[in-house]
Amino acid sequence: MGNTTSPQTLQQGVSLFNDVTDFLGARTAGQSPANAEERARLIETDAEGEARDIRRRAEQDAARLREDQEHARAGNNAQWGGSGLAMSGSKALIRDADRLKGRQDEEEILFDGEKDARSRLRSANNRANMLRIGGDASPRRSILSLGSKIYGRD
């Protein structure tokens, strides 16, 4: 799992660098607020699609792991059944512990996928808000943080 997140983290860093360069450089100079808002929405929409893909891949990986583990458990159960011995005591506890470990591994894959998806969305939101600020569009904020604009005391 560690190898798959490193390139993704690097890509997010490169994207963030490009957006900061855009923000500080000539590419966003003189950009209209509507254009900045449009680009920001595109970044957020793209991130939503990537987050869906990340979650879908995590679900597929978890399902593949579950299937592999069930196949291995079935083989072990068949060997026990063929031996004519009853599954009890410590052997049954080991089998149950293996099943629990498999569920934990599956949940860990799903958790990591969700964490990566949320990280991607958060990063895109930050980049989009930088574009909005650079283009004199309003970043998406809470009503409380926009208090002075609501009452015209900007």
Image (tube, rainbow, N blue to C red):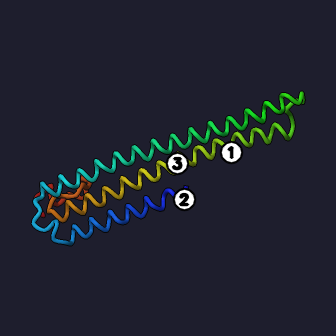
For the residues carrying marks 1 and 2, which lies nearer the camera in this image?
A: 2
Provide the residue designation for mark 1: 101
The amino acid type, in three-letter code, at marker 3 is Phe
Question: Mark 1 or mark 2, which has the lower sequence index?
Answer: 2
What's the CA distance linking mark 2 and mark 3?
A: 14 Å
| Label pair 1/3, CB-CB below 8 angstroms | no
Residue at coordinates 51% horizontally, 51% vertically from top-left? Answer: 112
Among the 4 quarters of the image, the one containing residue 97: top right
Provide the residue designation for mark 3: 111
In the image, taking residue 152 as reference, residue 68 lies left or right, namely right
Q: Say the numbered circle drawn on residue 78.
A: none
Which residue is at the front of the view, 137 or 56? 56
Report helix, strand or loop for mark 2.
helix
Question: Mark 1 or mark 3, which has the lower sequence index?
Answer: 1
Question: Mark 2 or mark 3, which has the lower sequence index?
Answer: 2
In the rendered view of the protein, which quadrant contains the N terminus? bottom right
What's the CA distance linking mark 1 and mark 2?
A: 19 Å
Report helix, strand or loop for mark 1.
helix
The amino acid type, in three-letter code, at marker 1 is Lys
Picture coordinates of residue 25 (x, y %)? 19, 72
For the residues carrying marks 2 and 3, which lies nearer the camera in this image?
A: 2
In the image, taking residue 13 as reference, residue 141 lies left or right, namely left
Provide the residue designation for mark 2: 2
